[in-house]
Image (spheres, rainbow, N blue to C red):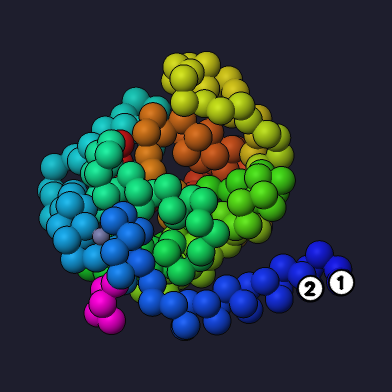
Amino acid sequence: MTQNKYLKTFSIFKDLGHLIYPSACLACENELSRTENHVCSICDNDLVRTSFHLFNEPTETDKRFWGRIQLKRTYSLFYYKKGATIQKVLFNLKYKNDSAIGEYFGREIGKSIIEIDDFKTADAIIPIPLHYKKEFIRGYNQSEALAKGLSEILNVPVKSNYTRRTEHTETQTKKSRFQRWDNVSSVFSIHKSVKGLKHIIIIDDVITTGSTMEALITSIKTVAPSIEVSVVTLAIA
Ligand SMILES: [Zn+2]
């Protein structure tokens, strides 16, 4: 059996499994009721929504990019808090290889921002790409799953093949912003089709320093200097 066929068969069994076994809450692992999605109502209460869509003044996500890069609009749905439900959601989103989690939370982001005029001109959603080896190991790209969910609500297409990550980067958690910038500045290649876009929404699971995001946007703007860029994340740390 080829690898592809094997993976396909595996995923069919996984889908069947979801039907046979009731799903568990991503955070506390208690069984979910029919009306709950991925997170039970008790853990959902522990998710802290930013309400940035109701803000007129600059948000923390905006400020993350001040003095670094010009953005049209930013949005983050939740505040990150260590040890809280959001940390478990992000972990599962990244490693559980279940696209439905990302698509669900992508739709949740979409429902929060659908009324924001700044996002209405967007003509593409671009997930932060993973290196293909990393994507192969994990099984999928969590940002792409978020992008699919967001796309369903905003009715804007996902263009995941317009950007590529060309190098493996080291684990970046213990490095300063400036070291990181050097590390990521040449890791993206951008397809020239981005020149045909006017306003893109870049999406990622969580924003910390914003360095990876900044590096990707800088690379895109090198190819398409007049493109407008917005940034959307599930959480802000
Ligand atoms: Zn729970």
Which residue occupies the extreme right position in the image? 1
> Disc 2 marks which amino acid?
Lys
The magenta segment: 32-36
Q: Is residue 35 above or below residue 60?
A: below
Instruction: Estimate how packed mark 1 is, as few (under 14), some (14 to 19) or many (20 or more) residues with alpha carbons within 10 Å.
Output: few
Q: Is residue 1 above or below residue 25?
A: below
Residue at x 37% of width, y 39% of height: 207
Tell me residue 29's x, y (percent). 33, 60
Q: Quadrant of residue 14?
A: bottom right
Kindly check if marks 2 and 1 are in contact, taking CB atoms under 8 A apart as contact.
Answer: yes
Q: Secondary structure at mark 1?
A: loop
> Can you see residue 173?
yes
Q: Which residue is mark 2?
A: 5
Name which residue lies at 37% across and 33% down.
Answer: 208
- Looking at the rendered structure, the kind of residue marked 1 is Met
- Percent x, y for residue 115? 23, 68
Q: Quadrant of ligand 1?
A: bottom left
**Foreground of the two, 71 or 170:** 170
Question: What residue is shown with label 1?
Answer: 1
**Quarter residue 15 falls in:** bottom right
30 falls in the magenta region: no
Q: Is residue 235 left or right of residue 43?
A: right
Pick the quarter of the image with the C terminus: top left
Majority secondary structure in the magenta region:
loop
Give the camera-side residue of 138 and 178: 138
Ligand 1 near label 1 (Cβ, under 8 Å)? no
Q: Residue at x 52, y 77 (%)?
A: 17
